[in-house]
């Protein structure tokens, strides 16, 4: 009988431990779910106020857990997406430039565009660097720098596309590929700049 009681007590204790573990896991799961909803709602709200809200959502929504509810992380994540997009576009430009039977106008425009792309990436990196120094005593100065560099990056991207305008008499197929490569990048830069301008 005593052995039976000991076994029963042991079983009940084990059952209690499992119940506590399950309750803790359930509580943690609920908390995690609530946090995820909070983070995704933050992205939705911010993107709804930005230009090109659909591109904003498509780009930033996957990074909700990283951004959480931080306006600063929102800016830097958008900028990093713009950097990656610009680098990919530069690869496209390089491949186009290596094609044969290009007109002299095509070659010149592609060369200028590649230079603009590199400058845009550089300006975007400067922008992120400035944002990372906003907690210092010169916050307003760094914030102004971020705005300036962000604007410069957008100007370089626009300059690339301008080089392929109809007036430049470049090959339509080349112009089309450049347009499709840089259109989204310009939108990402505009979104980044919008968030930077509304940081404070």
Image: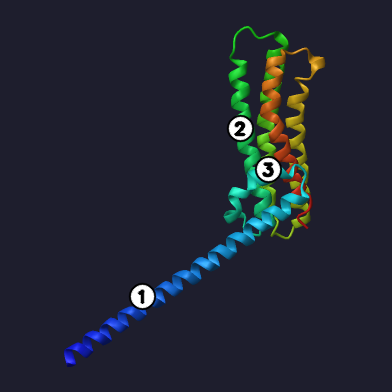
What percent of the width, then of the height, locates residue 141? 77, 52
What percent of the width, then of the height, locates residue 84? 60, 37
**Circle 1 crowding by C-alpha within 10 Å: few under 14, some 14–19, many from 20:** few
Mark 1 element type: helix
Name the residue beneath numbered marker 1. Answer: 18
What percent of the width, then of the height, locates residue 112? 71, 21
Between 35 and 140, which is closer to the camera in this rendering?
A: 35
Mark 3 element type: helix
**What is the distance, in whole Å, between disc 2 and disc 3 at their CAs?**
15 Å
**What is the distance, in whole Å, between disc 1 and disc 2 at their CAs?**
52 Å
Is 100 placed above or below 124 here? above
Residues at circles 2 and 3 in contact by the CB criterion of under 8 Å: no
Query: Which label sits in the foreground, 2 or 3?
Result: 2
**What is the distance, in whole Å, between disc 1 and disc 3 at their CAs?**
53 Å
Name the residue beneath numbered marker 2. Answer: 87
Extreme top residue here?
A: 101
Name the residue beneath numbered marker 3. Answer: 126
First-in-chain label (1 vs 3): 1
First-in-chain label (2 vs 3): 2
Residues at circles 1 and 2 in contact by the CB criterion of under 8 Å: no
What percent of the width, then of the height, locates residue 155? 77, 33
Is 88 placed above or below 189 here? above
Residue 137 visible? The answer is yes
């Amino acid at each position: 009988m005593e052995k039976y009681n000991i076994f029963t007590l042991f079983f009940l204790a084990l059952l209690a431990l499992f119940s506590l573990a399950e309750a803790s896991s359930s509580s943690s799961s609920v908390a995690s779910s609530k946090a995820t909803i909070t983070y995704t709602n933050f992205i939705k709200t911010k993107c709804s106020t930005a230009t090109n809200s659909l591109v904003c959502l498509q780009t930033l929504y996957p990074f909700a857990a990283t951004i959480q509810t931080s306006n600063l992380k929102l800016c830097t994540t958008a900028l990093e997406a713009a950097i990656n997009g610009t680098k990919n576009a530069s690869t496209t430009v390089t491949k186009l430039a290596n094609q044969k039977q290009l007109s002299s106008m095509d070659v010149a425009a592609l060369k200028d565009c590649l230079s603009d792309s590199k400058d845009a990436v550089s300006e975007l990196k400067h922008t992120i660097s400035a944002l990372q120094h906003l907690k210092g005593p010169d916050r307003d100065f760094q914030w102004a720098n971020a705005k300036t560099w962000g604007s410069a990056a957008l100007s370089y991207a626009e300059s690339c596309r301008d080089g392929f305008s109809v007036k430049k008499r470049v090959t339509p197929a080349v112009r089309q590929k450049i347009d499709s490569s840089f259109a989204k990048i310009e939108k990402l830069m505009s979104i980044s700049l919008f968030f930077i301008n509304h940081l404070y």
